[in-house]
Amino acid sequence: MRIGAHIGVGQGWPQAADYARDVGCECVQVFTRSPRMWRAAQLDEAAVAEFNDRMSSYDIGPAFAHASYHINLGSVDEELYERSIDGLALELSRARDAGAPFVVTHVGTDPTGDPDGAAERISAACARAIEASQASSDVTLLLENSSGSGRHFAGSMQQLGRLVALVRAHDVGLVGTCVDTCHAHAYGADVRSAEGWRRLLDELEDECGPGSVRLLHGNDGMFPAGSRRDRHAWIGEGEIGREGFAAMLSEERLQGVPIIVEMPGEIPEKDRVNIARLKEMRDGDPDR
Ligand SMILES: [Zn+2]
Ligand SMILES: [Zn+2]
């Protein structure tokens, strides 16, 4: 299970690769564009090529691209819905151009309290974005579970797995899941025990079969389970605790799945410390 962090590319792509190495990343997550703006500046091809050269020389990878926060694939506002599809298509083609084989996205909301309708809207939007991007042979779309706050869809593994099954039915490209530990915990799942992880994965697999989890967001959570409050905490300092992450690291069905930490706090400490904590837990068991 490769361990890394969400890192900034604002100081330059090659510099981001150096930063990743310095803090101990074995894989990374990036925004290929500002996540809080619709507009996106052109990718600097030479800088991206240098980033990828350095990443492979440091043996870091894969790179996951996290999509913009503006994207709401469940919106019933026609204009926002269409913009979100275009935005996700752009994320997929930019990821391909940046050499990132995965795009992680939040799925959006269920604004009218109609889960079946939301699942249809969101899955149709994903399929349209994949088709429009023409990147489906290079990039896998990963749908992330939410904390369930404010009508955010896919707090439950049932909803997340259902979305994957529905997108697959469109047969336009590869799709999988990203399970965020803080979001699952905030929604009310038990991610603190081996039994809890078994149940969570069973629920997901009941909807979309085995092997959908391609990425874990390893974030501790500041608030109690079921609080629906998405506040990340450093590994071992929140309500999930070291025991929860140890259970995750031991789960057989998650072996080989990369882990990315998305932490509050100051760089480089927040990344260096949290990566080191997870590595220490992982490497304590020689079979892992
Ligand atoms: Zn996340
Ligand atoms: Zn979060």
Image (cartoon, rainbow, N blue to C red):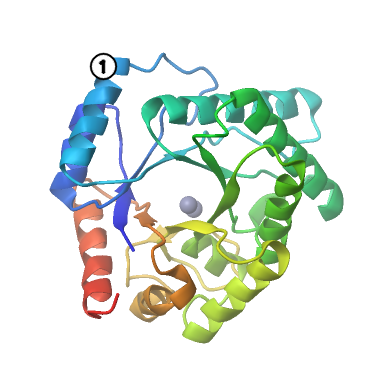
Which residue sits at x=51%, y=17%? Answer: 39
Q: Is residue 193 visible?
A: yes
Residue, disc 1? 46
Image quadrant in which the N terminus is located: bottom left
Q: Is residue 153 visible?
A: no
Q: Quadrant of residue 209?
A: bottom right
Above or below residue 37? Residue 193 is: below
Image quadrant in which the C terminus is located: bottom left
Q: Quadrant of residue 281?
A: bottom left
Which residue sits at x=48%, y=84%? Answer: 194
Q: Nearer the viewer, residue 231 or 3?
A: 3
Q: Position of residue 279 (x, y in %)?
A: 24, 67
The amino acid pointed to by label 1 is Ala
Q: Position of residue 139 (x, y in %)?
A: 50, 37
Q: Say few, some or many: other residues with alpha carbon within 10 Å of mark 1 (under 14 / 14 to 19 / 20 or more).
A: few
Q: How many marks?
A: 1
Above or below residue 135? Residue 148 is: below
